[in-house]
Amino acid sequence: MSPREPSLEFVCPRCGATITETIDEVPSYDVQADRESDAQGYAEQTVACHGCEQQFAVGIRNTGACLVANLMNENIHVSVIDDPVNTSDDPWEVEAYQRENLPSDPAQIFKFATYDIGHIAAEMEGRGLIDALNRMLLVQYFSAIEAYLSDRLIRLVLDDPKAMSALVKGNKEWVADKIEVVELASNPNAFRDWVHMRLRELMYHNFVKIDHYYRSALGSTMFPDDATKKTLMEFVPVRHDCVHRYGRDHDGRERSISKPDLERLSEALEGMVTHVEAAFARRGEAG
C-alpha cells in the first residue's frame, strides 16, 4: 500500500491488532448544495482484521474540510491517514490565509458589493436581457450577504472567547463532536481552529439556521423584524432556482425578477446588516 494513499486505521476490538486499510472510495463534497447535510458525501466500506479475520463496517463522510470515519455499531475511534480533503498542495496554505485575513469591517465590504450591484442594474436597464441580468444580480446579492454573515460571525467568535463559548454551548449539532487529545496537546489553538472550520462549512443563505448561531454568539437575532424575515425567506427559493435551475422553478417556469424585486431584497438585506451591526456595537460597548 502506498503511504500516500488515503487509508483507515483503528485497533481491532476483538484481538487488539492495528488495522490499516486503503479507502476504496473517497466520498465527494457538493459545494453547490443548499444544505450542509446534502453537501456532505458518504460512503461505507467493509474492512477485515488481518489478525482474527473479523470484518467491520466503516462509514466515511466528507465534511468539506476533512474525511471523518466511524466504525459502525462500535464505539471505537477510526483515524484517516493521508486525508486527501485536508491535504493542500498550496504553498500559501489557503486555510491559514482565510483565517488570518478576515475583513475587519464586513459591513463596509457588504456596502461596496451592493453599491456595485445597484450601479450595474441602473446602467443596464433598458438595454435588453434584463430578466437574465436581474437573476444574476439577485445571486450576487445573496453572495454579498453570505460573505457578510460569515465574516461577521467568524470575526466575533474568534475575537471574543465569551461569544465562542456561548456559541458552542448553545449548538446542539456539535454536542457529539470531539477533538483528539493529541491535537489539543500539539496545537494550543486546536479548539479555536475547530470552531472556525465548522463555521466556514455552513451554508449562510440558510437564514433560519444561521440565525440560531447569531442568537447564541451575538445574543441577538439577525432579523430586525418579522417583515424583513418574511421578505428574505421569500427570496431564498428564488435564489435556489437562479443558481441550480437557471432561473426556473421545479415546474420549468421561468422566474421573473423585476427591478422592484431587487430593490425590496436590497432593502431587506441592508436592514439585516444594519441591525446586526447595531447589536455587534452594543455588545462591544457592554464589554
Image: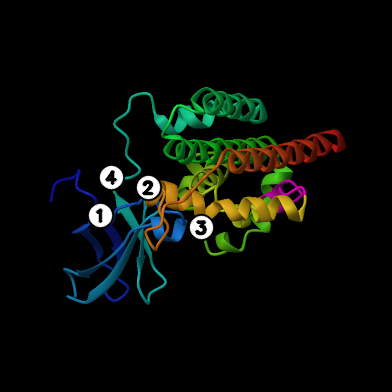
Front position among marks 1 and 2: 2
Where residue 64 sits: x, y (%)?
39, 48
Q: Which residue is more in the foreground, 209 or 94? A: 209
Question: Which element type, helix, strand or loop, lies under badge 4?
Answer: loop
Q: Residue at x 50, y 35 (%)?
A: 137
Residue 227, compared with residue 153, is above or below; it is: below
Hey, what amino acid is under mark 3? Answer: Lys
Q: Which residue is mark 3?
A: 178
Q: The residue under label 1 is which amino acid type?
A: Val
**Pointer 3 with pointer 2, Cβ within 8 A:** no
Classify mark 1: helix, strand or loop.
loop
Kindly report the distance in space between the C-alpha atoms of the residues bearing marks 1 and 2: 30 Å
Taking the magenta stretch, the answer to whether it contains residue 221 is yes
Work out whether mark 3 precedes mark 4 in sequence or the reverse, and give the earlier one. 4
Label 4 crowd bin: few (<14), some (14–19), many (20+), radius 10 Å: some
| Principal secondary structure, stretch drawn in magenta | loop
Q: Which residue is mark 2?
A: 246
Label 1 or label 3, whichever lies nearer to me, is: 1
Instruction: Name the residue beneath numbered marker 1.
Output: 26
Where is residue 80? Give x, y as percent.
32, 53
- Depth check: 53 or 30 in front? 30
Q: Amino acid at mark 4?
A: Pro
| Circle 3 or circle 4, nearest the eye | 4
* 153 relative to 286 in the view: left or right: left
Whichever of labels 3 and 2 marks the residue nearer the N terminus, that label is 3
Task: Identify the residue shown where x is 42% and y is 52%.
Answer: 254
Earlier residue among tags 1 and 3:
1
**Labels 3, 2: front one:** 2
Task: Classify mark 1: residues with Cα within 10 Å, few (<14), some (14-19) or many (20+).
Answer: some
Magenta span = 214-224
